[in-house]
Amino acid sequence: MNPVELIHLAKQAMQRAYTPYSGYKVGAALVTKQGDVYLGCNIENAAFGPSNCAERTAFFTAICAGEREFEAIAVVGGKDGVVTDIFPPCGVCRQVMQEFCGPDFMIYMGRGDDSFEAVRLDALLPYGFSAKEYMNET
Ligand code: THU
């Protein structure tokens, strides 16, 4: 699964976004180390707080399916589903990635054509907090 193929799958997931409030549609495609892909879209709520981002939808679907080892995620998004530039993951989604992924986990952010930005998780979330910090307790 190359980055462009993964971005195309993220665009398909974006079509399923439920966004009556912001109108911003976001799609994600998460690939495991074994090559299986899990899709996610953002799902909004009238109370705003319960809304879920596309990336977390993909992660939580995969985790619930028993997956634990992840290679990369592709993300696309834009107003009314029109992708004109990269749509970087929010801080909460970065922290969820930190929970389940290593520093070399890749994030591909598509621009709508076949161009994209590729960054490692340790660049997207420097000094990320994770379970290993608990090991340093005295
Ligand atoms: N959103 C995502 O789906 N992923 C992100 O990482 C950033 C924000 C969604 C949440 C909300 O439905 C819409 O984009 C506008 O913030």
Image: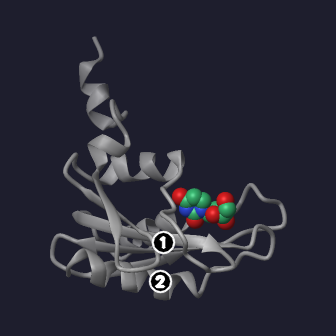
Quadrant where the C terminus is found in the figure: top left
How many angstroms separate mark 2 from mark 1 (CA)? 6 Å
Quadrant where the N terminus is found in the figure: bottom left
- Residue 4, by quadrant, is bottom left
Ligand 1: which quarter?
bottom right
Look at 24% across and 64% down and name the residue there. Answer: 70
Can residue 52 be seen? no
Q: Residues within 10 Å of mark 2 (few under 14, many from 20)?
A: many
Name the N-terminal-most of marks 2 and 1. Answer: 2
Can residue 105 be seen? yes
Q: Amino acid at mark 1?
A: Val
Residue with the mark numbered 2: 11
Look at 58% across and 87% down and name the residue there. Answer: 15
Considering the numbered disc 2 on the image, is that residue within a helix, a strand or a loop? Answer: helix
Q: Amino acid at mark 2?
A: Lys
For residue 39, side relative to residue 77 (left or right): left
| Residue 90, x across and y down, in percent | 53, 51
Residue with the mark numbered 1: 76
Q: Nearer the viewer, residue 134 or 112?
A: 112
